[in-house]
Image (tube, coloured by chain):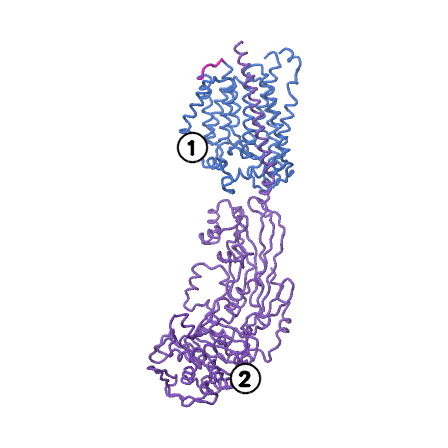
Amino acid sequence: MIDRLTEHRGLDSFDIRYVTLILAILAIGVLSIYSVTHGQQGGMAPYYLKQLVWIGLGAAAFLVMWASDYHHLARFAYPAYAFILLMLVFVLFEGRTSKGAQRWIALGSFSFQPSEFAKLILILVLAHYYSKAPRVGWLQRVIVPGLLMLPGLLLILKQPDLGSGLSFVAVYAAMLLMVGVRSQALGFILLFSIMLFPFAWEGVWGSLHDYQRQRIMAFVDPDYDPGGKGYHALQSKIAIGSGELLGKGLYGGTQSQLKFLPEGHTDFVFAVFAEEWGFLGVLVLLALFVGLIWLSLEIASKAKDQLGALLAVGIVAMLCFCVVINIGMTAGMFPIVGIPLPLVSYGGSATIMTMASLGLLLNVKRKRLSLFY
Amino acid sequence: MAMAESEFGDLYRRLFILRVGLLLVVALLGLRLWHLQIREGPYYRDLSENNRTRLVLLEPARGLIYDRHGVLLANNVPSFSLYVTLEDVKDREVLIQQLADLLALDPTLVRKKMTIKGSKLLPRKIKDRMTLRDATLVESHRLDMPGVMIQVESQRNYPGGVTAAHLLGYVGEISADQLEKPEFIDLHQGSIVGQYGVEKSYDRHMRGMAGQKSVEVDAVGHEKKASVVERPQAGNDLYLTIDVRLQKVAEDLLGAEQGAIVALDPNSGDILAMASRPGFDPNVLSRELTAKQWVEIVQDEGRPLNNRASQGQYPPGSTFKIAMAVAALETKTMSPSSTVFCNGGYQFGKRLYHDWKASGHGYVDLHNALVHSCDVYFYTIGQRMGIDVMAEFGKDFGLGKATGVELPSERSGIMPSTAWKQKAKNEQWLPGETISAAIGQGYVTVTPLQMASLVGTVANNGVSYRPRLVQAVMDRTSGNLQELPAVPRGTINAKPETFRVIKDALADVVTKGTATKAKSSMVTIGGKTGTAQVAALRTGPEENIPKKFRDHAWFVAFAPVESPKIAVVVLAEHMGHGGSAAAPLAKEVIETYMKLTPQVPAVTSELSSVNGPGRSSEDS
């Protein structure tokens, strides 16, 4: 530990590779958003300019997080969680509705999405919980954190926001696996969920909104009704597939330019990129994400305490989950759930939150290098 | 601390598993994308091309129709049509409702058109002949109705309205049944084809060839770019044999009565006029009719869609005596001078066959028998010749078979014979039936067109031509005018003397016989009256009988007697005697024709003088 300390000094913790990867991915995002929305009319500022503003705010959040101390932040985990739960309740009653879901809180001409920030706060809460005291037994390791997560999860599902809800569960599951669940407990959970599945299915399926059910049905067989329910999934596959090896070039993506592909700047931005830059472009983007996640895992494994490691793991898990699910759904491997591609999709809350999380990750690395805190 | 160390050790192990898992998942994603983009890339590229390009058919301009002097009878005018591309429609039921509300259309009709089998990518026609107001209404709502398109197209137009409606016919959208037939193989749903008249019989010439346009559209069906793949080819123009002025006169002569007038040139078979009443407006029928409108037309008692000239079958009555006279002379059953005594009736077996003149005509030869239409004379010769000899001559004159005029659904009438009755009714021919047939009653039925051909053949001394309606076709692509030659149909094998005798008699029918009302100061006319019985049993004077049971009036004529230029047939349904009801109309037609054509000029010079002006505007 001492030699490592001597290797790095001061701003060295501001890992230049790490930041370069983030900036490269952000650039791909802005480029794709620009390509798909440049022709759009309307009095509002163009999406790519707005996205640049979000990235600016995100960069500020990144720096603040990097400069802060995650130990201090962890102390505010519970109050912050309480606060975000209140926000989620507020959204339920006063939120702005768009496309059948009530997810946003209007702030003047902008609106923000508390469920995005809830993810980061959940990571803080769980990391704080596990690291504060040794948690033993399945009750302390599984049930209590589960109960901690539950109110947030339910409020998010109620909006409805299946994508954020799933990320919530993913973060919980990832941290659970990282702190180590006895095989007995794991088996118990598995058994329990299998037993409950028929009842849960009834409850889950029944509680789903029409469009969610349709999306799941569409996933099962998107080709059966083009123009209908499977429309998004099929058009997305066509967009990606028709890109072939080299892509159709910037602005050349007919699927996205002619608007066959819906939500080209948000959830389906990957399909836009894949259509215009082809398989080679896709490989580059995948490599950038793998690189970023690899460095993040490096940070997690070298964290100097359990809190830092768990924070890093939680953030990496969330990042991985979003990347894999988003690309998977646009490529027709998973049902379509509203999960944006981190750092690429247009969206203020998600961009700021993701960049703040990455700042926090870098903070974990920075704190490893400082002797006193 | 030891505890923490072990926790960390555990964490490292788990992080390692996480890395391996991550690489596996990313590899899986990469594999999937490789599959989509490389292996199935070309397939998806095709799909994306299909997504954005639509082939739009460019309808050809249908050929025009002119009369023999180049007067325009049918052309095309621009009109708006509504098309829907199902591929671009988000919710079909919503769209049907929107269109129904916007244009006051019948939703079930719209739904029917949308469900007809066919490509989802090809726009299908939902409504044509839209008003400018409706078209702009749709255009202004197009953003709310993806897949909807307004196309300017040419619509068939008949400037003359009801004039010559039965000849011209009308056009309409190809039916599902027609689409299955081989002759319509190049056509598609929404294609316009001739459904009646020469529009139908010459459809192949006039329809032209559709072109194609490739259109790039966005997801809401908005056109972005268009390029013509194949230009449409205009259909060919028709030049009919009719003189529309004569046609109009003939139609006006019939007026509100039911009946038919046919005028043809015996020297070529050219039909100069062919009127049938009641008529219809082909402009209305070429539009899309509602079910109610159709029922009204089809159930009309006057059967306006029926071309009585070629589809109406009537007993020829005494006009049949012309054929009988030829047969009698040619078989030497009678000589021109031999006589028959007529006392007003003809006893055959137990039955007495009446002459129309109860007091009788006394001794009559062939000439007088025709001039005064003596029934007993023809009963006698009919009895002597027998039905099969009569049938042979009748068939020589074209009775009992379709003339072959270029009109759909022509009827053939009946020229009975023993063989015919055996075949049609599986009964033996009764001798008494020969007697009825001898004066054109009983089983004998003819169409007015057949009678016109018959009288024309007699006028032309036995030389006969197939009646025809189209004399030339103008090829739109090459600009060549292809003249169709007259079609000879054989010659009646009879002595010139026979025709001279008969034509003399027919001339006297008009000058001093049963048709003095056809006498013209302008031109010599030969003719023969006829009265076709409708109901067998009649009591009281004609005026007391309900009109639908009254006799049909016939008059067949030709003029001038010396060198016939025109043969005319008038059939007036339920108008009683031919001499009073039909003969004056024939005279009018003949006089009009003589006035219109002092000398009959050569057809070619007329045609070449009318080409050019008025045609270019039809190219739309």
- Residue tagged by mark 2? B496
What shade does chain B have?
A: purple
Looking at this view, is A70 or B284 the one in front?
B284
| Overall secondary structure of the magenta section | loop
Looking at this view, is B47 or A353 the one in front?
B47
Determine the CA span between mark 2 and mark 1. 101 Å
Do the residues at discs 2 and 1 belong to one chain?
no
What shade does chain A have?
A: blue
Q: Residue A357 is drawn in which quadrant?
A: top right
Residue B399 sits inside the magenta stretch? no
Q: Is residue B82 above or below residue A87?
A: below
The amino acid beneath tag 1 is Ser
Number of callouts: 2
Which one is closest to the eye, mark 2 or mark 1?
Answer: 2
Question: Start and end of the magenta stretch?
Answer: A133-138
Looking at this view, is A280 or B220 the one in front?
A280
Q: Is residue A63 above or below residue B537?
A: above
Q: Is residue B585 above or below residue B65?
A: below
The amino acid beneath tag 2 is Pro
Q: In what quadrant of the picture does the C terminus of chain B appear? A: bottom right
Residue B357, horizontal then vertical, whole percent: 39, 85
Can residue A40 be seen from the camera position used here? Answer: no
Q: Is residue B403 above or below residue B17?
A: below
Q: Secondary structure at mark 1?
A: helix
Q: At 64% across and 18% down in the image, what residue appears?
A: A13
Label 2 Cα neighbours within 10 Å, binned few <14 / some 14-19 / many ≥20: few
Q: Residue furthest top?
A: B2
- Chain of the residue on which disc 1 is drawn: A
Q: Residue B298 is drawn in which quadrant?
A: bottom left
* Numbered mark located on residue A207 in the image: 1
Q: Secondary structure at mark 2?
A: helix
Q: In what quadrant of the picture does the N terminus of chain B appear? A: top right
